[in-house]
Image (tube, grey):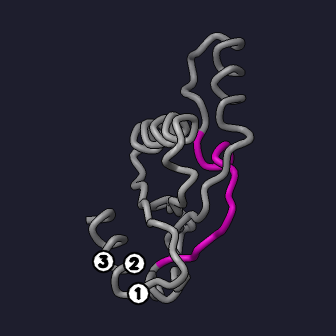
Amino acid sequence: MGLKQATGQDFIVFGKVRVADILTPESGLKRADWQRAFNKISAKHFDYVLCHRDSLKVEAVVELDDKSHQKDKRIQRDRFLEQAVESAGLSLIRIPAKPTYSIEDIRVKINQALA
């Protein structure tokens, strides 16, 4: 895809990262509510996670959107993830899935999301 080339030396790119490894339900919930919220994210994955090279702090997540993202169930999943990522103060970068990518186009998307 060229994601590593597009991020340059600033980030480390991790692929197929479990959402629950990046986000956790807010503390203070009743145990049953916390568990229900955790279950919603425990089986989901981000396509890619961009971490700051020096601190490994998560800076953004990347989702590749193929045709399946146009289905109702996937639209609901995407909205849920968007809200969760936003509430965590992270950037979500959506990239349409296609056979080839322009490294410069990806770089622009990343820079816009992190600006």
Q: What residue is shown at x 31% (from left), y 73% (from top)? A: 111
Q: Which residue is mark 2?
A: 106
Relative to the observer, which residue lies in front, 27 or 46? 46
Q: Are marks 2 and 1 in contact (CB under 8 Å)?
A: yes
Residue 83: percent from left, percent from top: 43, 36
Say what amino acid the circle numbered 1 marks. Answer: Ser
| Tag of residue 102 | 1
- Secondary structure, mark 1, is loop
User: Distance between the Cα atoms at labels 2 and 3?
Assistant: 5 Å
Q: Are marks 2 and 3 in contact (CB under 8 Å)?
A: yes
Q: Which residue is mark 3?
A: 108
Based on the picture, tell me whether residue 50 belongs to the magenta stretch: no
Per the rendered image, the range of residues in magenta is 11-23
Residue 64: percent from left, percent from top: 53, 63
Q: Is residue 70 above or below residue 38?
A: below
Judge the density around disc 2: few (<14), some (14-19), many (≥20) Cα neighbours within 10 Å.
many
Q: Quadrant of the N terminus?
A: bottom right
Q: What residue is shown at x 46% (from left), y 44% (from top)? A: 85
Relative to the observer, which residue lies in front, 97 or 55? 97
Q: What residue is shown at x 68% (from left), y 58% (from top)? A: 17
Q: How many marks?
A: 3
Say what amino acid the circle numbered 3 marks. Answer: Val
- Secondary structure, mark 3, is helix
Q: Quadrant of residue 42?
A: top right
